[in-house]
Amino acid sequence: MVPTRAMTDIPLLPAEFAGLDLLATMVVVVSASGECLFANASFENVMRLSRRTVQKAHLPDWFEDPERLLETLAGVAANQYSSSRFDAVLRRGAWAHEEGLPVHVVVSQMDADGEGAPRVLVELIEIAQLARQDRDERNLDQVQATKELTRNLAHEIKNPLGGIRGAAQLLALELQGGQVGEGGAELTEYTEVIVHEVDRLQSLVDRLLAPHRRAQVVGDVNIHEICERVRSLVLIEHPRGLDILRDYDTSLPDFRGDREQLIQMVLNIVQNAAQVLSSRIAAGDAQIVLRTRVARQVTIGKQRWRLALELHVEDNGPGVPAEIRDRIFFPLVSGREGGSGLGLTLAQTIAQQHQGMIDCESEPGLTNFRITLPLP
Ligand SMILES: Nc1ncnc2c1ncn2[C@@H]1O[C@H](COP(=O)(O)OP(=O)(O)O)[C@@H](O)[C@H]1O
Ligand SMILES: [Mg+2]
């Protein structure tokens, strides 16, 4: 038998690399020929690979153009240059059908290992990630500001509504008393319009204020139980033409949260998807996928979490209309006739109350709402 390095010879996380697991960028330590000696948590996350799989692998295999990397590795290992940068595209192993991931690659020399074999440090910076992080932070700030504005505005509107309604009712009584004479019936219609519109405004401001009203009821919750609830609720509404597929990572642990609110959050998102899928539902090929995954070392807002869960709600609908794409989480932004524009605002508020967040990527034929919630 050809002697191979036994798995037990390679500690899963060599102490000298422990710090690399804290980085948001992907980092891989390789031999001169590209054999993976260590890959950090970010790399495993993005590539959706386990640490053991990575350690048996050959980094260039994940590159669309492996030659470029191999040449650079050889050059750096042979000390022709101490570091080098280039752009490349990563292929995700188990996700071969997915589009490649554009990255900026930085290859640098490292100290040799104990036996003097050269080692090379490869940093992979997701090109889209830089732009996305910027955008997420801006979005969160904006959502916060809009939320406060909305809440204040809702209170300001709510206060005089009671007075307006009361006055209109008094007016209606006067009119019925007949003091006004001719045309009284017509005028009563006006007061009815006032009362009706006041009631509509009242329920709108109530909904605007709702998420902040109810105290949280915190208990142990299971994300898959929530998904199943939502799935059955939406399927009752759409018994035909809509498939809701599940792709669950059942290793996800329970976490503390408000079960009813979390159901509401997921329901709002899945219902939106079902709504935009209406023509596909009629055609019989509408599809929603509920996908759960573990994520490590995630940044939500300005906070960093070691572990989080991701719930992706994906649909094969037309995509979010371009005019509102940047604003869908803002209150009163709606792309559909009769929409309140509050569903996603409430969902985002609930996610934030659980220290999480929701973001969205959308193109025609594939829209993905990703809910990220930190795990203990
Ligand atoms: N899965 C989706 N695909 C396309 N557009 C969506 C999707 N989810 C939400 N949207 C868009 O975002 C808008 C805002 O959604 P929401 O806040 O729930 O308000 P509403 O459903 O009352 O319009 C929707 O009107 C729709 O235009
Ligand atoms: Mg909605």
Image (spheres, rainbow, N blue to C red):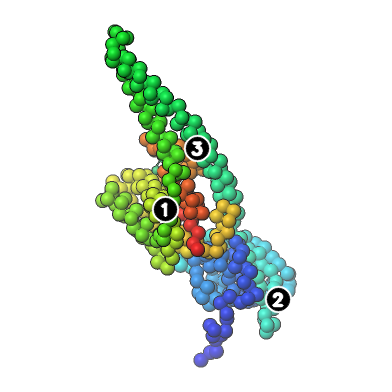
**CA–CA distance in space, label 3 to label 2:** 57 Å
Q: Which residue is mark 2?
A: 111
- The one nearer the camera, 225 or 100, is 225
* Quadrant assignment for ligand 2: top left
**CA–CA distance in space, label 2 to label 1:** 53 Å
Callout 3 amino acid: Arg
- The one nearer the camera, 135 or 256, is 256
Residue 120 left/right relative to 318: right
Q: Quadrant of residue 176?
A: top left
- Residue at the spot x=51%, y=41% of the render? 147
Secondary structure category for the residue under label 3: helix
Callout 1 amino acid: Val
Please name which of the two marks, 2 or 1, marks the residue nearer to the observer.
1
Label located before the other in sequence (1 or 3): 3
The image position of residue 316, as x and y in percent, is 38, 51
In the rendered view, tell whether residue 284 sits above or below residue 44: above
- The one nearer the camera, 342 or 314, is 342
The image position of residue 221, as x and y in percent, is 40, 60
Secondary structure category for the residue under label 2: loop
**CA–CA distance in space, label 1 to label 3:** 22 Å
Q: Which residue is mark 1?
A: 217
- Residue at the spot x=73%, y=69% of the render? 82
Q: Which residue is mark 3?
A: 151
Secondary structure category for the residue under label 1: loop
Q: Quadrant of residue 247?
A: bottom left
Label located before the other in sequence (3 or 2): 2
